[in-house]
Image (cartoon, coloured by chain):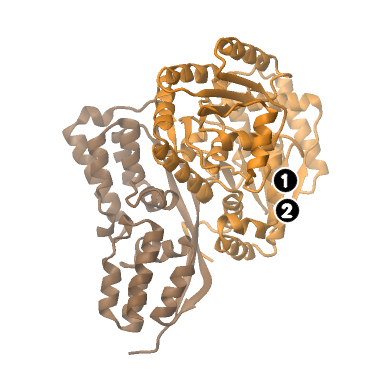
């Protein structure tokens, strides 16, 4: 696993020096992260990287995971969907079970750190144990249009925290506690994002039988309606009338998801008469995603709804021109015509793809700008910096803080 | 001349705070601008400069960007992005400048000013919380100052050029002020004060300042 100094090669040494300086300001404080799973999912992935790096910087950090049975996690899954805005029917028993599991964890967990950092709704009940220490609630979910009964239930806990953190401004409204904007990040030294040799990329393209004789337009996403793969095919067909190219729709995880399998079948049906559309159901293979992104001419993320959409940052980090929908956290990553192209429709996506395929110099410039934008804003080093500043902000209420 | 005080290089890192307040129309924006904290006005007139410094030497402010991209009011957007921020000595001055352009528009085109954007295209008011701390470097002559600026982080340079002038209301940039007060070279200080930092990318700005300082060393 990469050490903090390894990142200097990507960000420059001064960024690492600044991280060390601000970490010193937290000397003597300890931070305890709590979430609901040690493996799988974006939150665990972030904590797996952040906790060791914070400790290396001298910010003493622990990470605990709450315990819960299948029934509890069925309820929290309903909470998750309800916060995202899809209607979920929750019973009195569901709310009771949520409280019982939360309180059982409260009784068994050590929660006396200087700063307790609760991730997502699952462990939120723990805040009832708040003493004089500082508590932060981190919402990784798009809560812009939550189901009211669930949100009102959660608000009684949220209001007990000292601060809340969201990934995009649209994910929240006004609250009586301080709220901060901290976007997620990508790790430039991970398998999915590190530099690859030409041989490594060739090997992936051979392994997945992806020809490279035509410009390659790619969307890498689960086969999920919200990722709009059918809309991507329609956009490609409009582009194809004027510019010869190939479309690659690649994604994994559909086999164990009934709706995913159905979407995949619809995609295959729509693609079957065009040999230039490749539909690839991939196993979990980070190097392959990396190589395919690097060998693509244009990368598309035409989601109808998105949490943050870090696949966009991954593509931009590889210097690729991106066409992406203006939803969720995507507009934070793509400034239209500066670091990529935003679209709102199939026609808009088609027009932007055509523009980029027809103007390689313009596409290259957007890709270069995109890479710099990610370097400045969406790498794990920025995320570390903002976590440390967030911890410091708990002890300073002013807008200009002299340390 | 009194004893030379060393130029202490500071840096500033910022965290973005959400206000939870959003505007759906130009009329909303005018009302909110009246009471939103100065740190929010500062955020929206300087964010683009920090986040997209590589892309354009003339970054638009967020207000202009929103008016153009969400409301398609190109002429108003041009007027907002033409506001010459360097002419203002305080954040409240900038606030008044922006409000005046929006108010003129609303008076002339009341229907357009009340037009509501599509859901998802609202303007979210954010604010910057700045953390300022010494970077560990100092200089005691112009050559040392040039060396320090060459190796300073963009955040440090940004602090001495933009942040101290507006958020700490010092009236000018720290570098020209130090030269005037400690080196006594008024001509050099004036030359550095004349730079409009808003028309340079940060790296261009760094190069220009270092060139002028090297010439004078």
Where is mark 2, residue-wise? Answer: A52
Q: Secondary structure at mark 2?
A: helix
The chain painted orange is A
Callout 1–callout 2 Cβ contact below 8 Å: yes
List x then y, in percent, for residue B127: 44, 49
For disc 2, the chain is: A
Does residue A213 appear left or right of residue B24 in this picture?
Answer: right
List x then y, in percent, for residue A71: 78, 24
Q: Is residue A135 visible?
A: yes
Chain B's shade in the image? brown
- What is the quadrant of residue A226 in the picture? top right
List x then y, in percent, for residue A367: 47, 41
Does residue A196 appear left or right of residue A104 in this picture?
Answer: left
3D distance between C-alphas at marks 1 and 2: 7 Å
- What is the quadrant of residue A198 in the picture? top right
Q: Residue at x 44, y 37 (%)?
A: A340
Q: Residue at x 55, y 42 (%)?
A: A318
**Quadrant location of the N terminus of chain B in the rendered image:** bottom left
Frontmost residue, A199 versus A3: A199
Q: Residues within 10 Å of mark 1 (few under 14, many from 20)?
A: some
Q: Residues within 10 Å of mark 2 (few under 14, many from 20)?
A: many
Q: Is residue A154 above or below residue B34?
A: above
Q: Point out the residue furthest to the left here.
A: B108
Does residue B155 appear left or right of residue B208 in this picture?
Answer: right
Where is mark 1, residue-wise? Answer: A48
Establish whether labels 1 and 2 are both on one chain. yes
Q: Residue at x 56, y 11 (%)?
A: A270
Q: Residue at x 27, y 39 (%)?
A: B77
Q: Is residue A174 visible?
A: no
- What is the quadrant of residue A78 in the picture? top right
Frontmost residue, A139 versus A48: A48
Q: Secondary structure at mark 1?
A: helix
């Amino acid at each position: 696993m990469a050490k903090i100094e390894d990142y200097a090669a990507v960000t420059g040494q001064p960024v690492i020096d600044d991280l060390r300086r601000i970490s010193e300001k937290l000397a003597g404080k300890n931070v305890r992260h709590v979430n609901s799973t040690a493996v799988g999912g974006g939150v665990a992935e972030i904590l797996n990287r952040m906790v060791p790096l914070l400790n290396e910087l001298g910010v003493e950090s622990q990470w605990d995971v709450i315990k819960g049975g299948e029934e509890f996690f069925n309820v929290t899954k309903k909470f998750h969907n309800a916060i995202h805005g899809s209607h979920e029917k929750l019973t009195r028993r569901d709310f009771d079970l949520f409280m019982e599991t939360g309180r059982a964890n409260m009784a068994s967990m050590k929660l006396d750190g200087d700063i307790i950092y609760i991730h997502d709704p699952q462990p939120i009940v723990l805040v009832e144990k708040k003493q004089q220490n500082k508590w932060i609630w981190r919402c990784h979910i798009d809560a812009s249009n939550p189901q009211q009964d669930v949100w009102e239930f959660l608000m009684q806990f949220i209001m007990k925290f000292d601060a809340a953190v969201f990934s995009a401004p649209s994910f929240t409204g006004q609250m009586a506690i301080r709220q901060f904007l901290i976007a997620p990040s990508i790790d430039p030294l991970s398998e999915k994002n590190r530099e690859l040799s030409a041989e490594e990329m060739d090997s992936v393209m051979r392994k997945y039988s992806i020809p490279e004789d035509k410009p390659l337009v790619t969307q890498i996403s689960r086969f999920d309606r919200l990722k709009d793969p059918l809309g991507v095919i329609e956009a490609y067909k409009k582009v194809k009338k004027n510019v010869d190219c190939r479309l690659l729709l690649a994604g994994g995880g559909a086999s164990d998801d009934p709706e995913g399998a159905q979407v995949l079948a619809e995609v295959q049906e729509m693609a079957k008469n065009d040999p230039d559309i490749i539909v690839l159901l991939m196993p979990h293979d980070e190097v392959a995603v990396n190589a395919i992104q690097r060998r693509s001419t244009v990368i598309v993320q035409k989601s109808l709804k998105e949490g943050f959409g870090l696949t966009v940052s991954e593509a931009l980090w590889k210097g690729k021109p991106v066409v992406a929908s203006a939803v969720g956290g995507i507009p934070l990553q793509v400034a239209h015509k500066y670091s990529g192209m935003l679209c709102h429709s199939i026609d808009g996506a088609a027009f932007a793809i055509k523009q980029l395929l027809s103007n390689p110099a313009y596409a290259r410039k957007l890709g270069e700008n995109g890479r710099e934008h990610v370097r400045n804003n969406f790498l794990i080093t920025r995320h570390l910096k903002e976590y440390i500043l967030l911890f410091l902000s708990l002890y300073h209420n002013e807008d200009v803080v002299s340390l | 001349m009194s004893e030379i005080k060393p130029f202490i290089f500071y840096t500033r890192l910022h965290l973005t705070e959400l206000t939870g307040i959003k505007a759906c129309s130009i009329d909303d924006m005018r009302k909110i601008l009246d009471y939103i904290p100065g740190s929010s006005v500062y955020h929206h007139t300087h964010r683009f400069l920090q986040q997209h410094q590589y892309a354009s030497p003339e970054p638009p402010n967020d207000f202009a960007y929103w008016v153009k991209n969400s409301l398609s009011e190109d002429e108003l957007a041009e007027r907002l992005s033409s506001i010459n921020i360097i002419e203002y000595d305080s954040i409240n001055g900038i606030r008044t400048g922006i409000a005046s352009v929006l108010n003129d528009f609303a008076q002339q085109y009341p229907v357009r000013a009340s037009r509501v954007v599509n859901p998802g295209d609202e303007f979210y008011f954010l604010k910057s919380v700045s953390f300022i701390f010494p970077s560990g470097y100092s200089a005691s002559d112009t050559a040392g100052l040039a060396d320090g600026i060459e190796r300073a982080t963009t955040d440090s340079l940004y602090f001495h050029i933009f942040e101290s002038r507006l958020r700490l209301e010092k009236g000018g940039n720290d570098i020209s002020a130090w030269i005037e007060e400690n080196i006594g070279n008024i001509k050099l200080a004036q030359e550095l004060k004349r730079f409009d930092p808003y028309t340079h990318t940060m790296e261009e700005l760094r190069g220009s300042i270092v060139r002028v300082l090297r010439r004078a060393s």
